[in-house]
Image (cartoon, rainbow, N blue to C red):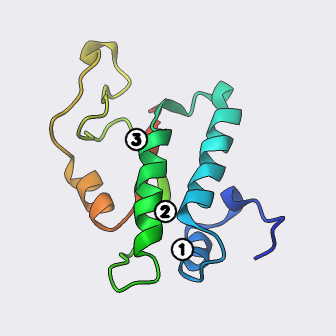
Amino acid sequence: MSQDTDLTTLTLTEARDGLRAKEFSSRELTQSFIDRVAASEKLNAYILTTPDGALEAADQSDARLGTDDARALEGLPIGVKDLFCTRGVRTTACSNILGDFTPTYESKVTENLWADGALMLGKLNND
């Protein structure tokens, strides 16, 4: 992969293959998305971002990539709709009614994503 490649334009399959081939790290991929999200803040796509947690998870994924411990979605950063409960991260379904609700449990959907090695960039707007 060329150094001029914008990692945020890769398909999920291309990103997965690039990570497995060690063409770039999960940290590099994740930082690219964090930067893109920050630069696009006016779009209001993300209602909450989790850059520190994403980078920490990326480092953990980088340690697993290339080993037998790597999982199907290892090191791939994703946004999670604010409909899904995420343990320890505010979840409001974009409603003022839920205020600052922070679940102590994980939704089955996100539980499965994390078990497969995906990492969260933040919570996506439902609009």
- In terms of secondary structure, where does tag 3 sit? strand
- In terms of secondary structure, where does tag 1 sit? helix
Describe residue 17's horizontal placement relative to residue 67 as left or right.
Answer: right
Describe residue 81's horizontal placement relative to residue 111 as left or right.
Answer: right
Inter-mark Cα distance, 2 to 3: 16 Å
Amino acid type of the residue tagged 1 in the rendering: Arg
Inter-mark Cα distance, 1 to 3: 21 Å
> Residue 86 is drawn in which quadrant?
top left
The residue closer to the viewer here, 4 or 43, is 4
Asked if residue 88 is positioned above or below residue 21 in the image, the reply reads above
Residue beneath the point at 44% across and 33% down: 126
> To which residue does mark 2 refer?
76
**Where in the figure is residue 48, as x and y percent of width and height?**
46, 30
Is there any visible trace of residue 74 in the rendered image? no
The mark found on residue 16 in the picture is 1
Residue beneath the point at 15% across and 35% down: 104
